[in-house]
């Protein structure tokens, strides 16, 4: 999968921490809304 500037992001599913629960979310859940995708490599790892 490759990200291309100016093109729509491909749909994907992942787990997210929302309202004190871990829930499965999809990019399609936010269709028509502004979305910020933030990837933080090595988060919560002890290095």
Image (spheres, rainbow, N blue to C red):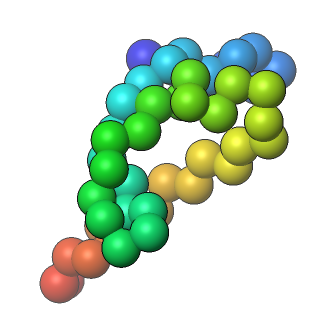
Q: Residue 38's quadrant in the figure?
A: bottom right
Nearest the eye: 41 or 28: 28
Which image quadrant: the C terminus? bottom left
Q: Is residue 41 visible?
A: no
Does 26 sit left or right of 5 as displayed? left
Find residue 43 and report its horizontal and vertical position in percent: 34, 71
Does 19 sit left or right of 31 as displayed? left
- Residue visible at 17% across and 84% down in the picture: 46
As displayed, is residue 39 above or below residue 47?
above
- Residue visible at 75% across and 15% down in the picture: 7
Nearest the eye: 7 or 25: 25
Q: Residue 6's quadrant in the figure?
A: top right
As drawn, the residue found furthest toward the bottom would be: 46
As drawn, the residue found furthest toward the left would be: 46
Find residue 17 and report its horizontal and vertical position in percent: 38, 63
As displayed, is residue 37 above or below residue 43?
above
As displayed, is residue 41 above or below residue 4?
below
Q: Is residue 47 visible?
A: yes
As displayed, is residue 3 above or below residue 16?
above
Nearest the eye: 3 or 11: 11
Q: Residue 41's quadrant in the figure?
A: bottom left
Q: Give the mark count.
A: 0
- Residue visible at 28% across and 59% down in the picture: 22
Which image quadrant: the N terminus? top left
Find residue 32 and report its horizontal and vertical position in percent: 79, 26
- Residue visible at 70% across and 17% down in the picture: 8
């Amino acid at each position: 999968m490759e990200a291309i500037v100016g093109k729509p992001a491909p749909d994907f599913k992942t787990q997210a921490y929302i309202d004190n629960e871990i829930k499965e979310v999809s990019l399609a859940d936010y269709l028509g809304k502004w979305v910020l995708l933030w990837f933080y490599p090595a988060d919560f790892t002890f290095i």
